[in-house]
Image (cartoon, rainbow, N blue to C red):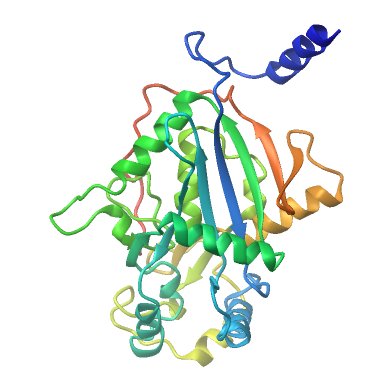
Amino acid sequence: LLVLLLLLSVNLSTQGASPVSQEEDTTELHEITVFAMPTMLPLDWSSPSSLYKSMLQVYLKTIGLKDNYLLGHVAVRLRSPLLERPLYTAQSSKKWQERIDLVLKQRVGFGILGAALAGRIEPPEEIQHKLSVYRDRNKLAFITFRVNKTAMSRMLQFYHAYQEKITPEFAASDFYGGAFWPRYHNEGAGCAAFAFSMLDLANIIPEEASIWRIDVKIPMNIVGGEFNNGKKIKNRTIKRTTSWYKGNGIKNTDYAEYYVWDPAYIYEWVLQQHHGPADPDYQLVHDEGVPGLYKDARNAHIDPNEPIFMQRPDTNLFI
């Protein structure tokens, strides 16, 4: 009976999926976990003015809070026999003062969303500490994907190449920005883009990720600094901008494209699954009281000819 149950479970887990290579051992445990740490208070993305007001509120309410990611954060854990120990990693900005200078001195307005900042790969011990802090605050959720060896190898190849020097001084990981996609040659990343690039390499970005994604057109009248002829944006201009750009204007002239996966949206979606009804593709799990989801994605199809890094196919005001 036990053998029959095991055979049945294997059969159900592989129905409708693209087969992995017959030469690959799928019994090895390779996992990527995406951790979502939301803002302490929700951001309102319905318009530039509402986003400005909610960001200001988050800042004022949490300015004295230790071990806090002001705008939320996404981190990654890789577990694999290819590693000596689990790898905790994340992309973050390096100097908070740089943001302050851009907003208060250069007055770039909403150009701050896509501005290139000094970046860094966070040390594993720092990430683990922050995860424990957010766990104790009940502000942490995760999604774990089990992948095959090919997928994990691609993620690790990306992880190491992303930190290699592209000039004598800089690697792509030395740049943080909301408009970057790190699978494009020599671009940095935001925290969510860094994590989602790894999922993309394994072809496992789930359909529901569209729910977590903010996709807006920023009106150029609230973008300043080097992105708009040195224009300085006044706060009252942002407060009066009650909608994102709509219409058929000229990209990079009338508006700037911007998208991001919001950590708070990921966090809330995981909690919704636990409150039910849950997506049948996931198992509901907990880790030290932290709510999470688990998905077996070993059979995701990976194109062996797809390169790790690609050329950007379009233009973006912030790149």
As drawn, is 270 to the left or to the right of 181? right
Tell me where residue 230 appears, x and y as whole percent: 29, 82
Report if residue 200 is visible in the image: yes
Tell me where residue 58 appears, x and y as whole percent: 61, 80
Q: In the rendered view, tell whether residue 216 sits above or below residue 5.
A: below
Which residue is nearer to you in this view: 9 or 286? 286
Quadrant of the rendered structure where residue 177 is?
A: bottom left
Which residue is nearer to you in this view: 257 or 279? 279
Number of callouts: 0
Tell me where residue 136 appears, x and y as whole percent: 68, 66
The residue drawn where x is 57% and y is 76% is: 48
The residue drawn where x is 32% and y is 55% is: 173
The residue drawn where x is 53% and y is 62% is: 129
The residue drawn where x is 54% and y is 73% is: 67
Quarter the C terminus occupies: bottom left
Quarter the N terminus occupies: top right
- Spot the residue most to the left: 168
As drawn, is 142 to the left or to the right of 106? right
As drawn, is 220 to the left or to the right of 19? left
Q: In the rendered view, tell whether residue 147 sits above or below residue 43.
A: above
Tell me where residue 128 appears, x and y as whole percent: 52, 57
Quadrant of the rendered structure where residue 7 is?
A: top right
Which residue is nearer to you in this view: 126 or 50? 126
Quadrant of the rendered structure where residue 42 is?
A: bottom right
Report if residue 247 is visible in the image: no
